Each structure stands twice: as C-alpha cells, then as structure tokens.
Image (cartoon, helix red, strand yellow):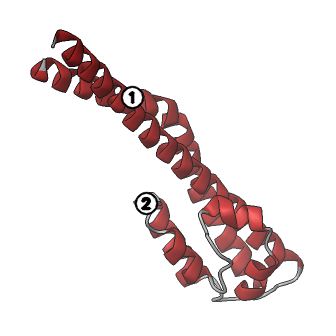
Amino acid sequence: MLVFRLVGCAMLIFAGWGGGSILCSREKGRLGQAQGFVALLRHIRSQIDTYLMPMDKILANCDRSVLRSCGADSPASSFEELLAQCEGSMDSAMLESLRGFCRELGNGDRTAQLKLCDRYIGILGARADKLAGEHARRCRLIMTLCICGAAGVAVILF
C-alpha cells in the first residue's frame, strides 16, 4: 500500500512539472507573438514608406512566417481581422496598443503614417523587450509554483 502512495505522490509531482512546462511554453509563445507583431509593424512601415500600399495589400504580400509568429492561423484581409485571430493569447497591453494603431492607421498623409508606425514600433518594441527580460523569471516562478503546489497536494494526500 505504501508503494501505491509513493507512486501517486510521484505522479502528482510529475503532473505539476508537466503543467509548469505547458504554462512556460505559453509564456514563450506570448513573447514570440510580441516580437512577431513588432516585425509586422516594421514590415508595414517599410511598405508604406516604399509603396504607400493599403493595409489589405500589405497583409496579402506579407511573409506567412511573420503572420504565423503573430499568431494568425489563416491569412487576414484586414488588420482588425488579424487582431481578432490573435486576441485570445495576447498580452492585454499589447492588444490595446495594436487596437490604437489600427484605429489611427490610414488617417493622414504618408509622413503622418510613418510617424505613427515609428511610435507604435517603439511602444511595442519596449513591451516586447520587457516581456523578454521577464521571461526567465516568470518561467522559474511558474515552475516553482506548479511543482510546490503538486508537492503540497502529494504531502496532504500521503
């Protein structure tokens, strides 16, 4: 009977480790998504600077790997549609910044749009850098809490 309890406790600890690993991979995905949106805004800026293309053509000509790094499952015809595809897994501060970018884009001349792109690249780049700086600490915290929580449950049940 003691063997079954020990095996059960070990299974709980491994389940805590597995849950922590899954949550850490989600954090890594959030970081990749933030960096993907910064790359997408840089691409949008370059297309506006070079060709002054409308958003639907910019997204249609965009590299699919950039859109996948943003979290898009399928090609989007508008920036709003792209945000709708990605909003479930995105950081709320980044989502609000991107919605602001979406509202303001298309208003004004080429120079105003380039300034807008530069401003939001700076805002989102700073947010992505902050997420990158916090990534290792957050993963350690997540793993610690999950394993300690599982160990606590194992001790209570033992």
* Secondary structure type for disc 1: helix
What label sits on residue 17 in the rendered view?
Answer: 1
Rendered image quadrant of residue 4: top left
- What residue appears at the point 15 percent right and 13 percent down from the top-left corner? 1
Residue 98 on image: x %, y %: 53, 70
Local packing at callout 1 (Cα closer than 10 Å; few below 14, some 14-19, many 20+) is many
Q: Residue furthest front?
A: 1
Name the foreground residue: 105 vs 144: 144
What label sits on residue 112 in the rendered view?
Answer: none
Is residue 25 found left or right of 7 in the rendered image?
Answer: right
- What residue appears at the point 61 percent right and 80 percent down from the top-left corner? 79
Q: Amino acid at mark 2?
A: Ala
Dot in front, 1 or 2: 1
- What residue appears at the point 43 percent right and 66 percent down from the top-left corner? 88
Q: Mark 1 vs mark 2: which is more N-terminal? A: 1
Residue 52 on image: x %, y %: 82, 85
Residue at label 2?
93
- In the rendered image, the quadrant that contains the C terminus is top left
Residue 77 on image: x %, y %: 66, 86
The answer to whether residue 37 is above or below residue 31 is below
| Cα–Cα gap, marks 1 and 2 | 29 Å
Name the foreground residue: 9 vs 95: 9
How many numbered discs sit on the rendered protein? 2
